[in-house]
Image (cartoon, helix red, strand yellow):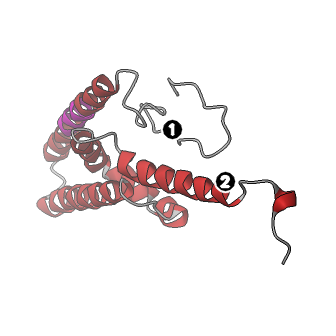
Amino acid sequence: MTDSPRPTAPGPHPEPIRFFGTTWLDHSGHYGLRRAGVAAGSLALAAASAVLLRIGYQGMALAEVGWVLNVLVVGMFALCTAIAFGREWESFTKRPDPERRQSLRGLMAIGFLGVLVAWALRSLREAPGEGLHRAEYEEAVAQASRRRARRTGHPGRRAKR
């Protein structure tokens, strides 16, 4: 989903971000509209999801499953949502461990509401994950320029050691 063409020059290339491609690099390709769309879409999905959870809770109340099960279900969704929000928010600033992310996949699915809210809040400031990707890209560009600087000059004229 990259809107800008991939550079053909040697060196590091920016990593695309979901819904933004590589437009986060120079904020081109309706970047602001995409951020607003991601924020609005995430909030709309979170609101719709909250309504569906409410309908599910009302179904449990109609079934008269008991107050203990009601408390457990509400507590489970609240706890999973809080943990999912924290994990997703943290993943915007540092790379998550793939094994740990895989092991928490079920918890993140239950706490999907937290993930949606994290995306909505983060997209108000920047593309979700942009800060992490920008720092990694700038470090890769700096390393590439240092490597090129060391290789400049004619190798035959270099002093023998």
Compared with 75, 46 (above or below) is above
Question: What kind of element bears circle 1?
Answer: loop
Left or right, residue 23 beside residue 144:
left
What amino acid type is highlighted by mark number 1?
Pro
- Residue displayed at 61% across by 32% down: 7
C-alpha distance separating marks 2 and 1: 25 Å
What amino acid type is highlighted by mark number 2?
Arg
Please say whether residue 103 is one of the residues in the magenta stretch. no
Compared with 58, 144 (above or below) is below
Question: What kind of element bears circle 2?
Answer: helix
Q: Are marks 2 and 1 in contact (CB under 8 Å)?
A: no
- Residue displayed at 34% across by 52% down: 110
- Residue displayed at 61% across by 54% down: 144
Question: Dot 1: few (<14), some (14–19), or many (≥20) neighbours within 10 Å?
Answer: some
Say which mark, if any, is on residue 148.
2
- Residue displayed at 59% across by 53% down: 145
Can you name the residue that lies furthest to the bottom here?
Answer: 161
Task: Say whether disc 2 or disc 1 marks the residue closer to the N-terminus.
Answer: 1
Q: Position of residue 47 (x, y in %)?
A: 18, 34
For the magenta stretch, what is the residue range?
A: 42-51
Say which mark, if any, is on residue 16.
1
Judging depth in this view, the residue of 129 and 5 nearest the camera is 5
Report which quarter residue 149 is drawn in. bottom right
Left or right, residue 129 beside residue 138:
left
Judging depth in this view, the residue of 73 and 101 nearest the camera is 101
Judging depth in this view, the residue of 13 and 9 nearest the camera is 9
Q: Main secondary structure of the magenta part?
A: helix
